[in-house]
Every structure is written in structure tokens, then in C-alpha cells.
Image: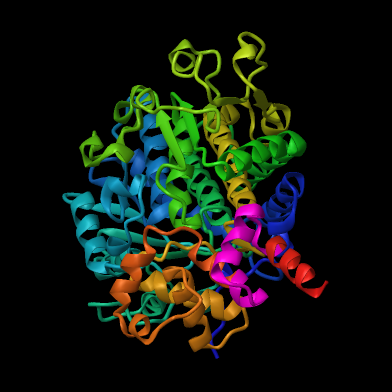
């Protein structure tokens, strides 16, 4: 019998998140995020002795590279959120190297290349050979490489290929697998055009570790996501915590700092930042409510800033389409001078299309309305940002860490995070706190933006219980996923689930044999431009209503479970 991986399981804490008000949504997110540090059931947590010791060991290898940079390199590999946070880590620590006037020693391998910083790139994620070729290019000419392969579910074929390549070249590579499932729950399905499963690669890693050869599996369990399977949230947060902790530990040890940085204390700092963010729960809920109203009315959310905090906005925006089935326009991010601020490997990729145009000047090309929301991230006093929003019709919010008074009349709402500097200084010392302050601010922004877009999409009706239901039926995999969602949530047999899916796709209550006999490709072609395919089908199936009635109910009440309850109550009268 197959066991659901923890990263794909439903979190009992959040099963009622879809019918909560904004304050309740934020409270549930807070409880789910607490599991990152408090642990989940009896599994090893971030603060478990084994986790801390593994981080110490990996930091020692990175320290060696920092102290002896000739031929050395640290590479972060991953797909989607994991790869994006690998990019953030490489950017952060290369900047610290530049500040120290030392060579840049950090690189990232992101499935799909830099296009994947902003859009989902599914084909490269499923290709282990693409991962191998990317790692070969990144490590060419290097003699000692610490490779950290990030895959929250221990499942990504792209990362499997890279780990396997490292295991084939033990003289050059120290492989590290970073994820958040127990080893026994690594994916064991065949990988297309490859001769191994992810589980087999994990077993190779374990054999190497048992033989005394250097390799590591770093897999604390942080518990199921608040929105089932959405590893952009807890998985992404834990990834950022671990990558920054291990690299900062290595950097401080390499520079022989007067302060002795403790791995455990560093992780406790992130916990303190989490507490600081959620201490403003009611104020954060106000922003969630406004964002939800904006999306429900057809508006968009825009993140604006000038530094790495704004990059967290770019990442949050990029994760909304694959997580919530939203459009590429619903949530977008813009940063300073665009790619000059981003500092990505491929440079300016704006020719790929308008969704790759990310500078503040590009934001000026958007025609804003009163339905739209502009969220300025910690740059409210900087004229370079204010000039882009002053006088615009949209609602304006400031997310800041400063005591902000001047020009506050520009903003409809100011959300200020009070960083717990006294606590941080006590845990890791002032020198370490000063160095890590931007990383702490970034993760605080991540928590805020994740809450805003998660809450906004819940309020828009994208979630049923804690399951993202409004999938875009735009390819074969998503067609079958949509049918599976209907079968599970509607308690339908397979044929009935497909029947209601086709009813919604073709906007009819009578699916003819002609429609049934059409190829799936035609169903996908018809479904792709349509909205709320699965929610409409579920409401119709559960309430016994017509497709037209189901769609009307969701227009009036977008929260799916509430619409169903109201329909059933009305029918019983």
C-alpha cells in the first residue's frame, strides 16, 4: 500500500482554512509555520541534534572551499521554488564574497534556466539528463564541488540526475540531498528516459554514507503544507533557513570571526523573526483582506522594490500560477533596475515576453485601476519607487521595517515589522546579526507575501478545504488531475467525475456521445481559456444543480464550500 509523502499530505490544522475570515487564515498559517521549528509528530526537526550535526559537517566542507578557493565551488540545484531559493542563496553569498573582496564561489542550477525564475518550466524539471548537463556546465574546471540538491518531496528527476552524477564522480563532488520527507518516502516511480528512480538514487547516497565516503542527506520533517502540496511555503521557508544557516556558519568560521556562530542559535533567530511577523497578525489580515477583494473584483497585485526584498516579491509572484491556477498577470513583481538588480546568470531575458520585464520602468507600462493593489516592499521613503506609484488609481500598501512617517499619505495601509534585534543579538551576537540582517528581512517578507497571496486566493475561491482545486485544465496531466480531484472531493466514481468535468468544460448538462468521443487534446483545447472548470463541476455534482446554476452560485459566493452549503440549504427548504 502506498503512503502519502508528508510534503503531499493534508495538514489537519488547515482543513478549514477555506471558510475562515482573513484573521483566521493568518492564524492558521501561523500555526502551520510553527511546525517548522517545533517539529512534526516524532520526526527529526530543524533543531534535532542530527540535523544540527549534519549542518555543522556540511558547513565544514564549504568552509574548506572558502579558505582554499582555487578549484572550489558550491552549487545549489533545484526546480521551481527550490531552485529559486538556490538562486537567492548563491546571490546572497556571492555578494558577501564581493564585500570581502574574495572570488564568487556560489552558483545555482535551476531547471529550465532563468526563465524558471518567473514561470513554471515543467519539462526540464522532469528531465534528469538536463540536470546532469547543467551541473557539468556549472562545475567545469572545478576540482572540489559541494553540491546541494534541493527537492522538498525527494522526488525531482532534475535533482536525481545531478545527485547521481555526483555519486559517479566522488573525487570531485560532495553530494548533499536536501528535502523534507523521510528517506523511505522518496519517490520510487520510473523516470522517463532514465534507468533509475529517485529512491534508487537515495539508496546510492546511503550506501556511500555507510561506506564512510562523504555524502549527506539533510531531511528534517517540517510537516504538511497549509495548502496541500504547496511546497513554496513551509518547504521553501525551511530551505532558505537551512541554506543560509550552513553557508553563514561556513563563512564566519572561514573568516575566523571573533564570534562563534552556533547553527542552533541561527535557526532560533529565524524562529524569532517568524514570531515577530505573526505578532502583527491583525494588521497582516487587513492586507490579506484587501488583496482578496482586489483579486475577486478582477484586480491584480503588484510588488515593487529596489533590492533583495523585492526579489522575494518576484519569487512569490512566480509561484502563484502553478499553485493556484492564476494567470501570469494576477500577481507580478518588479525590482529596481530589473536584471541589473537581479544579478542572475543569464542576464536580461526580457525579450522572452512581457512577463519577463521586471524593472520599475516596466511597471509604468501597466494601466492601473482602482481594483489593483501595489505593495511597496521597504522602499516607501525612496523617491525611485514613489515616483512609480504617486498619483496612480490603485490601492497602495507599504511593507516596511522602518518607523515610517514621511509621505505616509501616499499609502492606504502601512504594515511595519519590528525585527527582534535584541533577541537576535543575544542569540548570535551583534556582528552575526548585522551580517544576517538582510536574510532575516527577506524571510520576514517571504512569510508576509506568502500569507497575502495564499489568503487572497482562498478568498477568491481557489481552495476547497486546504486543497487547491481551481486547476487550469491546460494539459493532459492537469486534465486527469482535475478528474481525480472531482472523484475524491465529490465522492464520485471515475466515470461520473469525468462526466461532470466534461459538463463544465463544454458548459452543458447533456454530454453527448460526440463530446465523449472527442480526443482529450480537444477537451484541453476547449478548457484552457475557461475559468473555474473544476469548482463549477464540483458544485454541480455535489448539489445536483445545472452547470449554469453552479457557475452563478460561485459568481455570487466564490468560496466553494460555502456555496455548496448554501445551495444544499436552499434545496432542503
Q: Residue furthest left?
A: 141
Taking the spot 58% from the left edge, 72% from the top edge, the residue there is 546
Q: Main secondary structure of the magenta part?
A: helix
Q: Quadrant of the C terminus?
A: bottom right
Q: Is residue 416 above or below residue 123?
A: above
Taking the spot 66% from the left edge, 35% from the top edge, the residue there is 287
Rendering coords of residue 441 (x, y %): 57, 32
Q: On the rendered structure, is 389 left or right of 161?
A: right
Q: On the rendered structure, is 159 left or right of 139?
A: right
Residue 212 can be seen, yes or no:
no
Relative depth, front residue between 253 and 128: 128
Relative depth, front residue between 329 and 98: 329
Residue range highlighted in magenta? 539-561
Residue 426 can be seen, yes or no:
yes
Quadrant of res 91:
top left
Taking the spot 32% from the left edge, 56% from the top edge, the residue there is 121
Q: Quadrant of the N terminus?
A: bottom right
Rendering coords of residue 305 (x, y %): 47, 25
Relative depth, front residue between 572 and 398: 572
The answer to if 544 sits in the magenta stretch is: yes
Amino acid at each position: 500500500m502506498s503512503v502519502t509523502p508528508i510534503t503531499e499530505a493534508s495538514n489537519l490544522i488547515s482543513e478549514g482554512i477555506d471558510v475562515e475570515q482573513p484573521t483566521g487564515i493568518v492564524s492558521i498559517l501561523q500555526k502551520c509555520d510553527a511546525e517548522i521549528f517545533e517539529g512534526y509528530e516524532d520526526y527529526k526537526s530543524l533543531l534535532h541534534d542530527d540535523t544540527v550535526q549534519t549542518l555543522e559537517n556540511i558547513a565544514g566542507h564549504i568552509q574548506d572551499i572558502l579558505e582554499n578557493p582555487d578549484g572550489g565551488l558550491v552549487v545549489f540545484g533545484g526546480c521551481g521554488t527550490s531552485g529559486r531559493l538556490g538562486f537567492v542563496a548563491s546571490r546572497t553569498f556571492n555578494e558577501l564574497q564581493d564585500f570581502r573582496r574574495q572570488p564568487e564561489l556560489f552558483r545555482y542550477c535551476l531547471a529550465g534556466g532563468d526563465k524558471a525564475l518567473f514561470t513554471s518550466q515543467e519539462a526540464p524539471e522532469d528531465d534528469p539528463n538536463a540536470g546532469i548537463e547543467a551541473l557539468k556546465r556549472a562545475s567545469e574546471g572545478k576540482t572540489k564541488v559541494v553540491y546541494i540538491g534541493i527537492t522538498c518531496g525527494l522526488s525531482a528527476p532534475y535533482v536525481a540526475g545531478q545527485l547521481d552524477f555526483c555519486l559517479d564522480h566522488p573525487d570531485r563532488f560532495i553530494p548533499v540531498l536536501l528535502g523534507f520527507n523521510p528517506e523511505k518516502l522518496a519517490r520510487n516511480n520510473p523516470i522517463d528516459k532514465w534507468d533509475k528512480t529517485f529512491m534508487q538514487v537515495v539508496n546510492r547516497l546511503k550506501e556511500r554514507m555507510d561506506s564512510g565516503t562523504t555524502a549527506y542527506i539533510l531531511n528534517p520533517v517540517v510537516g504538511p503544507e497549509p495548502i496541500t502540496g504547496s511546497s513554496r511555503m513551509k518547504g521553501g521557508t525551511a530551505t532558505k533557513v537551512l541554506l543560509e544557516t550552513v553557508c553563514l556558519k561556513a563563512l564566519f568560521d572561514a573568516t575566523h570571526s571573533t564570534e562563534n556562530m552556533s547553527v542552533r542559535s541561527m535557526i532560533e533567530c529565524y524562529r524569532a523573526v517568524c514570531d515577530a511577523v505573526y505578532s502583527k497578525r491583525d494588521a497582516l489580515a487587513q492586507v490579506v483582506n484587501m488583496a482578496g477583494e482586489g483579486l475577486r473584483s478582477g484586480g491584480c497585485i503588484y510588488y515593487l522594490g529596489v533590492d533583495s526584498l523585492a526579489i522575494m516579491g518576484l519569487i512569490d509572484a512566480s509561484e502563484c500560477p502553478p499553485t493556484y491556477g492564476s494567470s501570469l498577470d494576477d500577481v507580478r513583481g518588479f525590482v529596481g533596475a530589473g536584471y541589473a538588480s537581479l544579478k542572475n546568470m543569464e542576464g536580461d531575458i526580457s525579450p522572452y515576453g512581457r512577463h519577463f520585464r521586471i524593472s520599475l520602468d516596466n511597471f509604468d507600462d501597466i494601466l492601473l485601476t482602482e481594483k489593483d493593489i501595489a505593495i511597496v516592499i521597504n522602499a516607501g521613503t525612496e523617491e525611485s519607487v514613489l515616483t512609480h506609484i504617486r498619483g496612480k488609481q490603485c490601492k497602495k500598501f507599504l511593507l516596511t521595517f522602518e518607523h515610517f512617517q514621511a509621505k505616509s499619505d501616499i499609502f492606504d495601509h502601512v504594515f511595519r515589522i519590528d525585527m527582534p534585534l535584541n533577541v537576535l543579538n543575544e542569540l548570535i551576537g551583534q556582528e552575526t546579526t548585522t551580517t544576517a540582517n538582510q536574510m532575516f528581512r527577506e524571510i520576514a517578507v517571504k512569510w508576509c507575501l506568502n500569507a497575502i497571496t495564499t489568503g487572497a486566493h482562498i478568498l477568491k475561491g481557489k481552495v476547497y478545504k486546504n486543497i487547491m482545486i481551481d486547476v487550469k485544465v491546460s494539459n493532459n496531466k492537469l486534465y486527469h488531475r482535475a478528474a481525480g480531484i472531482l472523484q475524491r472531493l465529490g465522492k464520485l466514481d471515475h466515470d461520473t467525475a469525468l462526466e461532470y468535468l466534461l459538463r463544465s468544460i463544454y458548459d452543458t448538462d447533456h454530454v453527448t456521445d460526440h463530446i465523449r468521443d472527442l480526443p482529450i487534446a480537444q477537451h484541453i483545447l476547449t478548457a484552457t481559456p475557461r475559468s473555474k472548470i473544476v469548482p463549477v463541476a464540483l458544485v454541480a455534482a455535489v448539489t445536483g444543480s445545472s452547470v449554469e446554476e453552479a457557475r452563478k452560485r460561485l459568481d455570487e459566493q466564490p468560496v466553494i464550500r460555502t456555496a455548496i452549503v448554501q445551495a444544499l440549504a436552499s434545496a432542503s427548504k
